[in-house]
Amino acid sequence: MAGRPRDWHPVADSDPIPGDPDQVAALGRKLRKTAEELERQIRNLKAVAEVDAWDSKAGKEFREKAKGNVRKLEAAFKRYDTAADALGTKVAEIGGGYQDKLNAKPTNYASDLNRAQEIADASLKDAKDADERKGAAQRSLDGLTEKEKEDKKKGFEEKRDAAGDDITAAREKISQAKEIRDNAAKRAREAIDDVISHDSLKDSFWDKFDDWVEGIGTFFSNAAAWLGVVSLLVGWIPIIGQALAGILGSLAMIATLISTVTTVIQVIRGDKGWTDLALAVAGFAMMGVGKAFSKISGKFIKGSLARVARAGKAATGKQFARSNKKLRQIAGKSSRLEKGDFWKSMKEPFSELFSKSTWGNNFKALNPFGSGGNYGKMANELAMRGDGSKMKGLAKSFTIADPGVSWDLKSIKQGTAALGEYDLNAVNKISKTASRLRHFGAGVTIGGLALDDHFNPLLK
């Protein structure tokens, strides 16, 4: 179609009825083409569903599913068919003058838009002609002499006023054209809304519920993945690392638990399979087991740390010998714990999630305004490990370990200055055993994270 007029003086500041009827009709033709393809597929599926030769359980099940798909395709066809009719697939021209176009029967949006624009364009042309006549009459009036005004003033005033009335009439015609356009848009919108609101493809409560569950699951899955990674990377920090990693690790497990619950719901709803559920449960369990083994490592080394402290403070040779003997006994235990310690360690990562004291103690340890002065202690510890340099202390301290375990290991090694050579071997053996346990725990935790599709592309 020809371009729309740009100058709408004297009836409007800009185009009162913008739009391209030909583009609207082109969209209508695309919708019609899709509707026709859907109709063809419906006929094919109906033909397959009506074949009784495949008389078996699988054949009956296939025909039932085919019938269900036919219903969905019919609903989709109705949407496209209705939208194509509402918009129109071609622009129907209405002949005649203003009254013919004004009183023409409504058809589709493209044709009615074109009809409204034709009325507006013709009205603009009339208004511009009237504006020229009005201007000419006014200029003639302004140029009259006093003698000429007696004979010609009234005639020019009538011409000016008549031209003004023609401009007003043009504006009214444009208002009627806008009403034609608005009514056409309303009919098209209502037709499309009606078919969408009442067919079987309309999102039900459960569709919205499924979307909500998926969104919640995705959010907490993301949160669990990154919180788990960060918790592994901060455990080495002296003094405050235990509290910081404890909070982050617990938050990661809570997020994983919520994500697992959403997976259970999605399995029940048929949106995910049992494999997805197995991976989610395994990921949650492995994060807990990983933390549990790190706790076992911590419990194993606590006794050693206490024994090293006693050996360093031994006042007599007998006391020193007893401490050395106890260290060798601990070193020979490998990973054996006291009765009940193993299962207690396994339960702690899960029970701590709901322990008020655990959360309170961790947040208290991280409070920069608290009375503990933990941040100052952290700085001093880093400086000590780095022989006066905090940066060297950072480099020497970094490790992927459970909060507190790395700290205790380093404390044991620092406390062996007063022990004999054979006792250092025992301490080294204890250190290796504890390290194997905590590294195994970190490996299990990382394995749990690897079951998340954010880190494992094979699971995407």
Image (cartoon, grey):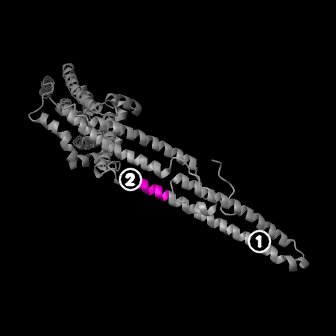
Q: Main secondary structure of the magenta part?
A: helix
- Quadrant into which the C terminus falls: top left
Above or below residue 416? Residue 348 is: below
Q: CA distance from mark 2 to mark 1?
A: 53 Å
Residue 387, given in percent of the width and then of the height, sits at: 37, 29
Quick check: 337 left or right of 436? left
Above or below residue 14? Residue 390 is: above
Residue 107, given in percent of the width and then of the height, sits at: 51, 55
Q: Tell me if residue 285 can be seen.
A: no
First in sequence: mark 2 vs mark 1: 1
What residue is disc 1 on? Answer: 160
Q: Is residue 39 magenta?
A: no
Disc ID at residue 195: 2
Instruction: Count neighbours of disc 2 (C-alpha within 10 A) and say few if under 14, some if 14 to 19, many if 20 or more.
Output: many
Quick check: 13 left or right of 403? right
Tally of numbered tags = 2
Q: Residue at x 31, y 41 (%)?
A: 70
Amino acid type shown at disc 1: Arg
Quick check: 171 left or right of 80? right
Magenta-drawn segment: 185-194
Between 9 and 307, which is closer to the camera in this rendering?
Answer: 9
Above or below residue 281? Residue 130 is: below
Q: Residue at x 62, y 65 (%)?
A: 173
Instruction: Count neighbours of disc 1 (C-alpha within 10 A) and say few if under 14, some if 14 to 19, many if 20 or more.
Output: many
Residue 90, given in percent of the width and then of the height, sits at: 54, 47
Above or below residue 197? Residue 148 is: below
Tell me which corner region of the image, top left, top right, bottom left or bottom right, holds residue 283.
top left
Between 116 and 300, which is closer to the camera in this rendering?
Answer: 116
